[in-house]
Amino acid sequence: MKRCVSTLIVVFAAACAGGDGGPYDLLVAGGTVLDGSGTPGVASDVGIRAGRIVAVAPGLDPASAVRVIDATGLTVAPGFIDLHAHLDPLLRLPDAESHVRQGVTTALGGPDGSAPWPLAAYLDSAETAGPGMNVAFLTGHNTIRQRVMGPADRAPTAAELEQMKGMVAQAMDEGAFGLSTGLRYLPGTFAETAEVIELARVAAVAGGIYTSHLRDEGMQLINGVAEAIEIGRAADIPVVLTHHKVIGKPMWGASERTLAMIDSARAAGIDVMADQYPYTASYTGIGVLVPAWAQAGGDSAFLRRVADAALRDSVIAGIVWNIENDRGGGDISRVQLARVDWDRTLEGRTLADWAAREGRPASPRTGAELVIEAIRRGGASGIYHVMDEGDVERIMRHPFTAIASDGRLVRPGDGHPHPRWYGTFPRVLGHYVRERGVLTLEDAVRKMTTLPADRLGLTDRGRIATGAWADLVVFDAAAVIDRATFDAPHAYPAGIPFVIMNGTVVVDDGEFTDARPGRVLRRAR
């Protein structure tokens, strides 16, 4: 009698889970399934047919499957969704291997105010290339403003504002998931809050979201967070404080206030959340150390200013202030050069190393002179070691913080990138879950799957459920870890033997297949 009851329970469980008897194109069997909701994992099988999950239940028949992946001892999770990815190289690197090997199956491009334009033509090209992962895009305020107004440091005319609003509407019609801003960067830094609200309202009408690289993440961080929340309130649009962090030692610990601001805003009915990468260093162009006023009009105008002795002193003073209080971390050895096309020997070295090579003191003044020289030679990007671990962990724990890479697609040997380009998601699972216990495994997976999926309105991705697209990552919770470091960034992670996308295996027992079954996702109105 006990056997009969037991059998009935298994059959009932399979039926409730949407199980069927096959046939299956692929069966992932014997793993611990984390469905993305944050609830504890259960021992179960996942049956896949025609690119979708058709069964989630224990004891599915392996004989009914074309292929069986034995996931015994492994964790089966929804494919990770990266809310902040720099997909600029997608047409050149369509396989997206550096992302896919992390378990990422869907990525959102067009962050920080910079995005393809026009969007429709770009999405068509991406489809033709055959992406290695599912990709979606925002439209970018900086890109739109630059096309309408150039690098002008002024408010738009009424006609210019209407033109920009029309461009946002066009991008939304063409499938954009929302509007991004980079208010720390040119020319977005010249925009007043009212301008951004007007554009965000257009995106909101189309059902989009608003993601904000804050106007300031250092000394004026609180004001930057307040501005983003106000834009969300005034435009009635869901907000993501993108790559949320605290820059510069004078502000360390301020995440207590910014997270309280998120909580207060949510309590008031403003739909705001954050995303975050799990590192204590940021990455961006070397121009981030230069005051915005000095860059108005573009590089040629900047170089004219620094050629004027009086203006040069003011520019240097502004850069020195940023080195001492913001991205410089008070020490030019904290600024690590990453991409230097005009002198590849400097890649991976710091401003202090460069100063030593020139026989100059490692002072903020020297650092400012070298920043000007770097821009004169064509620019450079840098890694800025200016964040505190306490803020990283506090932000990570917040229930409305998603994990996102802020990484750019990359090939091994290409420059000296931030290790987040290779290691974001496995670093959270290995270092912050297993080694430090900052998050539970279930919550970490939620922050990589359903939380970003819900923000994007993706009801059939980011979860393991019947009817959902079969985007899955199979990893070893006892071994998954990032291997990319700040000194040696070109390294794929360990402990992720299988990645499945739209029902196709793209990482197969640790080997990248270059199958490219990804899809270009367009948001419907």
Image (spheres, rainbow, N blue to C red):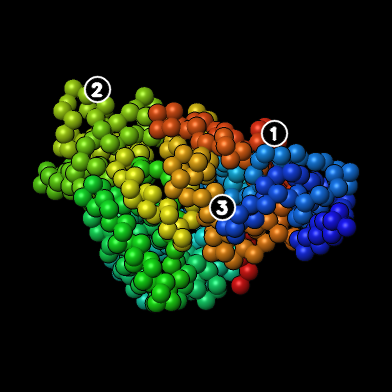
C-alpha gap between disc 2 and disc 3:
49 Å
Residue at point 58%, 40% (across, down): 477
Tell me the quarter of the image containing the N terminus: bottom right
**Mark 2, other Cα within 10 Å: few <14 / some 14–19 / many ≥20:** few
C-alpha gap between disc 1 and disc 2:
46 Å
Q: Is mark 1 on a helix, strand or loop?
A: loop
Mark 3 vs mark 1: in front: 3
Tell me the quarter of the image containing the C terminus: bottom right
C-alpha gap between disc 3 and disc 1:
23 Å
Q: Residue 509 carries which label?
A: 1
Q: Is residue 62 above or below residue 397?
A: above
Residue reaching furthest to the left: 310
* Amino acid carrying mark 3 in the image: Glu
Q: In this view, does 140 lie to the left or right of 329?
A: right
Q: Is residue 397 left or right of residue 462?
A: left
Q: Do the residues labelled 2 and 3 touch (CB within 8 Å)?
A: no
Q: Earlier in the sequence, mark 3 or mark 1?
A: 3
Please state which of residues 177 and 290 is positioned toward the viewer in this rendering: 177
In this figure, which residue is indicated by the disc labeled 2? 357
Q: Can residue 424 be seen in this view?
A: no
Q: Is residue 289 above or below residue 510?
A: below
Q: In which quarter of the image is residue 65?
A: top right
Q: Residue 442 carries which label?
A: 3
Query: Where residue 458 sits: x, y (%)?
Result: 62, 63
Query: Where residue 244 sits: x, y (%)?
Result: 38, 55
Q: Residue 288 carries which label?
A: none
